[in-house]
Amino acid sequence: WLTARISVGAGLIKLRGGECWQKKTCLYYHFETQPIPSPMSFIFHFLPKGALRKAVDLDYFVQLYSVWMVLIPGFGWYMKNLRRLGGFIQAGFMVNIILSGNFAFLNHVTIIPALACLDDDCFPS
């Protein structure tokens, strides 16, 4: 539940926010203006503009569409795997944000509730 609240909240802020999110241009300058750029921010900043627009689409997909998979109950093989996939998508997206910028511990802490979607069978014994 917490993963869904965090992700949907972040996605809705982008939808309601500035015009640059609707035009998909926010990432053109995001990596150079964030609070504490990481060493990888330089690389992300110089990606082609088309890739940065697709990254905004990915952001919307993860935060507004695929996030609902984390709320699926784990009854049956198919449902359990959908929930796991949702957890992996959320955690992977947070790792991407950690690589592209430094928001202190925020994204590290956000990974923790996403790991709750993974049961014991996801980890080697």
Image (spheres, rainbow, N blue to C red):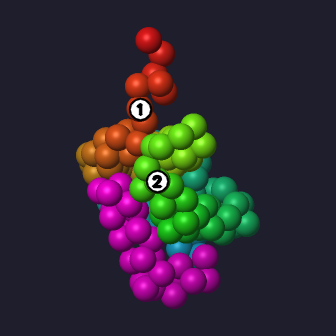
Magenta-tinted stretch: 1-24
Q: Residue at x 41, y 25 (%)?
A: 120
Choose top left, top right, bottom left or bottom right for residue 78. Answer: top right
The spot of residue 14 in percent (x, y) is: 45, 76
The spot of residue 96 in percent (x, y) is: 50, 46
Q: Residue at x 35, y 40 (%)?
A: 116
Question: Residue 122 versus residue 97: which sits nearer the camera?
Answer: 122
Amino acid type shown at disc 1: Asp
Q: Which mark is residue 67?
A: none
**Residue underneath mark 1:** 119
Mark 2 Cα within 10 Å, few/some/many (few <14, many 20+)? some
Question: Residue 103 versus residue 118: which sits nearer the camera?
Answer: 118
| Mark nearer the N terminus (1 vs 2) | 2
Residue 35 visible from this viewpoint: yes
Q: Is residue 78 left or right of residue 39?
A: right
Choose top left, top right, bottom left or bottom right for residue 47. Answer: bottom right
Q: Which mark is residue 72?
A: 2
Q: Residue at x 67, y 64 (%)?
A: 54
Q: Is residue 3 left or right of residue 30?
A: left
State the SS at label 2: loop
Q: Residue furthest front?
A: 76
Residue 87 visible from this viewpoint: no
Amino acid type shown at disc 2: Ile
Q: Residue furthest top?
A: 125
Whether 12 is among the magenta residues is yes
Q: CA distance from mark 1 to mark 2?
A: 13 Å
From the viewer's perspective, is residue 1 above or below residue 86?
below
Q: Is residue 105 left or right of residue 33?
A: left
